[in-house]
Amino acid sequence: MTKSHTFSSFVTAICNHFSDHFYAKNIDIFNYCQPTPLEEPNLVHINQSLCEDLNLNPDIFNCEGALKLMSADTSNTNLKPTSVVYSGHQFGTWAGQLGDGRAVTLGEIPVKNHSANREVLWDIQLKGAGLTPYSRFADGRAVLRSTIREYLCSEAMHGLRIPTTRALCLVSSNTQVQREKSEAAAILCRVAPNHIRFGSLEHFHYLNDFDSVRQLLDYIINRHFPDWDSQEDRYEKLFKSIVISTAYLIAQWQSVGFCHGVLNTDNMCILGQTLDYGPFGFLDRYDPQWICNTSDYNGRYSFYNQPSIGLWNLNALAICFSSLLSREKIISILKLYEPTLITKYQKIMSNKLGIRYKKSNHKLVDDLLKILQKNQVDYTFFFRQLSYTQSLSDELLKLFNEKETIKIWFKNYQSLLNQEKSSRVPNISMLKVNPKFTLRNHIAQRAITNAERGDFSELKTIETLIQSPFDEHQNYYNYSLPLPDELHSERLSCSS
């Protein structure tokens, strides 16, 4: 798409590139759904970085038409917004039909994918835009705190080079909704190459509508993997792609200490992107058993469990392919998940330590994590400090209560560094993979508290740091410091 210089051209692009072929094949997956506008909306933030990536001029959002549309007022447009149905397993139990309870998709825009040398479509979706046919007993609204959290975390993940949905802008309002208290409603404009979930396929499989399963898979292949369109093994290739991309995604989560919090099958994307930010969190003090979701009473979605839950969800998805692939083929593809995830994770961890990847390094990594856990050391801060020296500096040593164990580990680590005799400078490569900044919950809460008073400056500051988390940002050193001793890692509810 050529660069949009006016908002009307942006809207025209959405109208012109809505993928009608998705709905022309009689897949009963959506309803046309007019969103409900917010009262007295205020466009409080525009994602300049994402505008550039989508080839949009950020200035196009500084007009009345943009404010109206981003606050869910589609009057005076030719848009046909839709909400989509899906089902899913929630906390390991079949939940039946779910769907876009508070999201409507306005349409799509084409974006040049330079690596694939073709245009790809990106969904433009409003989250918090009011009731849909799938809202059930909810009001279809999002609140300001939840939209800020999702906005910041999706940008944090993108800054960490982890696949994710992103957000184009944030709209606040005077519309009041009731949660634990009365709060201001808000809308997040979420964008992604696709929002199709594991649960989208489960929906049709458990209706015994296998023809729709096949048609939906054909749509996914045509949209994202067009080279496979006419190949007999296209479903096999697609399932393998989902398994591999999911393994890569969760390995990356584990390497940066990210805990999703609600890894239901309806919250997992078929493209291996991080989807739906609710009760998430980044590890402060290293604790693999940490549960970031107050509703996760049994710890099903703890940080430690994420890799195994990824496989559980892939097994649930595999059932949807059973009408198209043999049991033997499905099992052989599922067996790729664990070694792929482990290898990807260990390669990343080797890079974080500035050493070459070898299987014999696994013990060095595991021993370090055990020491970090026992001493309750801040995960992100430790690796960043290590990147500067690769030695047990006073700054690092004071993080540990039991100093002898970490001294022994460092002796083994530095021996390995000496053996490698690499021509590269370890700290330069390490600083590129060990972020100085992650989205700590107490930092995000500060942005929320200020925003609820009408001050969005802290949100903009944090955005700057997390969009380039490997840079020094010397003036913002305090944002990189470990969680204060008097605070505990904050747990969030599903409404957060």
Image (cartoon, rainbow, N blue to C red):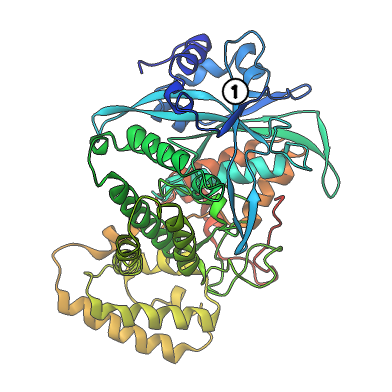
Residue flagged by tag 1: what amino acid is it? Pro
- Numbered disc total: 1
Q: Nearer the viewer, residue 324 or 43?
A: 324
Quadrant into which the N terminus falls: top left
Image position of 416 with respect to 7: above or below: below
**Within-10-Å neighbours for mark 1: few <14, some 14–19, many 20+:** many
x then y, percent, for residue 137: 79, 43
Q: Position of residue 376 (x, y in %)?
A: 55, 78
Above-or-below relation of 495 to 341: above
Camera sees residue 134? yes
Residue 401 found in image quarter: bottom right
The part of the image, by quadrant, that contains residue 383 is: bottom left
Q: Which residue: 52% across, 58% down? A: 480
Q: x, y (%) of residue 367?
A: 39, 83
The residue at which mark 1 appears reads as: 81
| Viewer-closest of 398 and 12 | 12
Q: Is residue 82 left or right of residue 102?
A: left
- Residue drawn at x 66%, y 62% as measured from the top left: 293
Residue 351 in the figure: left or right of residue 473: left
For this rendering, which residue is in front, 391 or 339? 339
Which quadrant of the figure has residue 282?
A: bottom right
Which SS class for mark 1?
Answer: loop
Q: Residue furthest bottom?
A: 404
Report if residue 434 is visible in the image.
no
